[in-house]
Image (tube, helix red, strand yellow):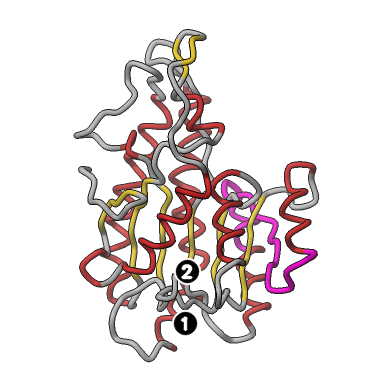
Amino acid sequence: MAGLCVRSTLVTGANQGIGLGIVKQLLQMPNPPEWVFAAYQDPKGEQAQELQHLASKHPNLVIIPLEVTDPASIQAAAASVREHLKGSGLNLLINNAGIAKVISLETETVENMSQVYATNTIGPLLVSQAFLPLLKKAAQGSSSSELSCSKAAIINMSSIVGSIEKICFWDNVQYISYRCSKAALNMLTKCQFLGYRQHGILCAALHPGWVQTDVGNSAGHKGGCFLGQAPLTVDMSVQGMLNVLCSLSEKDTGTFLDWEGKALPW
């Protein structure tokens, strides 16, 4: 990951799964970021114990309270990060926080659709808006004219189940609200690409693969029967995605890629 030279990174949903895996591997880089901001809604809660332990060993890791569905919390998080950066910009924003509800087409509800969409689609929109000034500052302060994650970037953690052309796992789990929210997140990524490229900010959507997380493992079950374990560990997925981030350039902004860098159908 020698090509990923970021001074500052913020990861949402950083307390477990892929988010925590990203934080861990960023900290283990030969030249880790000067600042790794790990955002989670309850940083002092039981589900953030591993994150707290990491912060006790790594002075460059800062845990930021952030509830992605709460505009006031998002603004407070942006203010806290801005204070830590002391006039510098934020190079890399990874919108990873997300939720999934394993509900069928027949039983999907307004409440579930609203909750999942608020977290998986509106959340990344609002977080990106709040941190846009810091991303702009990073882009303006870069000596490079080329787009890259080392300069300034928004990476939205999407999923292949959000692809309208390629419907995956339908026979296992229908994931209605999750599928719709990720399809909308993909469109948001395209909109951010169109709106933010003039500011020197790269935008892309990433599919982490079928990973051994709570969401990933649920795709291996159907009707109470176990159909198979997700093939990727968190470490494998994160390592692949960080390698992809190293290679992203002008030609990749506004794209939908998987953890190996392969283009996916919208």
Above/below status of 157 relative to 202? above
Q: As shown in the figure, which amino acid type bears the numbered disc 2?
A: Leu
Residue linked to disc 1: 137
Where is residue 254, by image quadrant? bottom left
* Residue 118 x, y percent position in the rendering: 50, 40
Above/below status of 29 relative to 123? below
User: Magenta segment: does it hold 152?
Assistant: no
Mark 2 surroundings within 10 Å by alpha-carbon count, few (fewer than 14), some (14 through 19), many (20 or more): many
Left or right for 151, reference 235: left
* Residue 81 x, y percent position in the rendering: 63, 71
Eye-nearest disc, 2 or 1:
2
The residues tagged by marks 2 and 1 sit, at their Cα atoms, a distance apart of 12 Å
Left or right for 30, reference 110: right
**Which span is picked out in magenta?**
56-75
Left or right for 25, reference 158: right
Which of the two residues, 32 or 34, is positioned nearer the viewer here?
A: 32
Q: Residue at x 46, y 74 (%)?
A: 135
Which of the two residues, 170 or 80, is positioned nearer the viewer here?
A: 170
Disc sitting over residue 24 in the figure: none
Q: Residue at x 24, y 46 (%)?
A: 264
Residue linked to disc 2: 92
Which of the two residues, 227 or 97, is positioned nearer the viewer here?
A: 227
Q: Secondary structure at mark 1?
A: helix
Which of the two residues, 127 or 157, is positioned nearer the viewer here?
A: 157
Where does the N terminus fall, quadrant-wise?
bottom left
User: Magenta segment: does it hold 59?
Assistant: yes
Q: As shown in the figure, which amino acid type bears the numbered disc 1?
A: Lys
Q: How many numbered markers are drawn? A: 2
Q: Secondary structure at mark 2?
A: strand
Q: Residue at x 27, y 64 (%)?
A: 253
Q: Earlier in the sequence, mark 2 or mark 1?
A: 2
* Residue 240 x, y percent position in the rendering: 41, 55
